[in-house]
Image: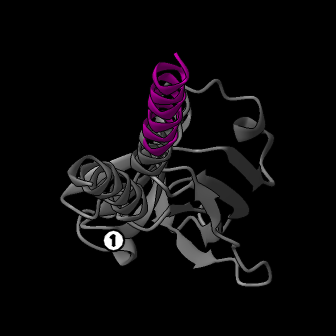
Amino acid sequence: MIKHLQQLALAAATLSLSLVAIGPVRSATLTYNFSGSTDSGFLAGETYSGFLSFDDSNITGSGREFLTLTDLDFDFSNPVFSNADPISVAEASFFNGTFVGLSFSAETYSFVPGFFEVGEASFAYQVNQEGGAGDVNYRLQTSQTPVPEPVPEPTFAAGLLLFGVAGMGLKLKRKMEWKKLEM
């Protein structure tokens, strides 16, 4: 009888451990539209626009963080910028979990994120020894509601595996006991 209680306790503990896992992690691809205009240099008054997308599942919400973009589209009417080679990886920049702008540089222009808030973000360029800068405004795309996708949790899978192994062990043990009784 005590053996059965021990087995039942083991099975119950294994099952409860498999179900105690923290809720599933959610990830979503967020898209920000951006636009702005240059307010200095020989391109003063020129406008630009575009969008950037990234997966936000790795944000911890602590300190300065950067996430590599999954998509970036930049439309500037001036052909100087359309063929510029990138010199850095395009990243979404965050401060304490809050989006503060795009961090990206090409040979003729750069997007500079804000340090503490997105309102500090800017755009700068330099072509033929002449430079200028401008503002950049970001807007989270709301026409598409990001649908969080569940990400499998390793603790749940490990608990389920442990529960299955324990069940198989109990079944095997019973079989062995039955064989002993038959002999």
Q: Between residue 7 and residue 163, name the one nearer to us.
A: 7
Q: Residue at x 27, y 54 (%)?
A: 1
Range covered by the magenta-colored residues: 163-183
Q: Between residue 128 and residue 55, name the one nearer to us.
A: 55
- Residue 134, horizontal then vertical, whole percent: 49, 64
Q: Residue at x 45, y 37 (%)?
A: 170
- Residue found farthest to the top: 183
| Residue 43 is at least partly visible in this image | no
Q: Between residue 117 and residue 57, name the one nearer to us.
A: 57
Position of 7 compared to 168: left or right? left
**Is residue 168 placed above or below 11 in the rendered structure?**
above
Could you tell me how many numbered marks the image carries?
Answer: 1
Q: Is residue 78 magenta?
A: no
- Residue 3, horizontal then vertical, whole percent: 26, 46
- Residue 180, horizontal then vertical, whole percent: 46, 20
Q: Residue at x 28, y 64 (%)?
A: 61
Q: Helix, strand or loop at disc 1?
A: helix
| Residue 173 is at least partly visible in this image | yes
Residue 77 location, quadrant: bottom right
- Residue 172, horizontal then vertical, whole percent: 51, 27
Instruction: Check disc 1 and give the amino acid type.
Output: Glu
> In terms of secondary structure, what is the magenta stretch mainly?
helix
Residue 34 location, quadrant: bottom right
Residue that mark 1 sits on: 120
Position of 84 compared to 106: left or right? right
Count neighbours of disc 1 (C-alpha within 10 A) and say few if under 14, some if 14 to 19, many if 20 or more: some
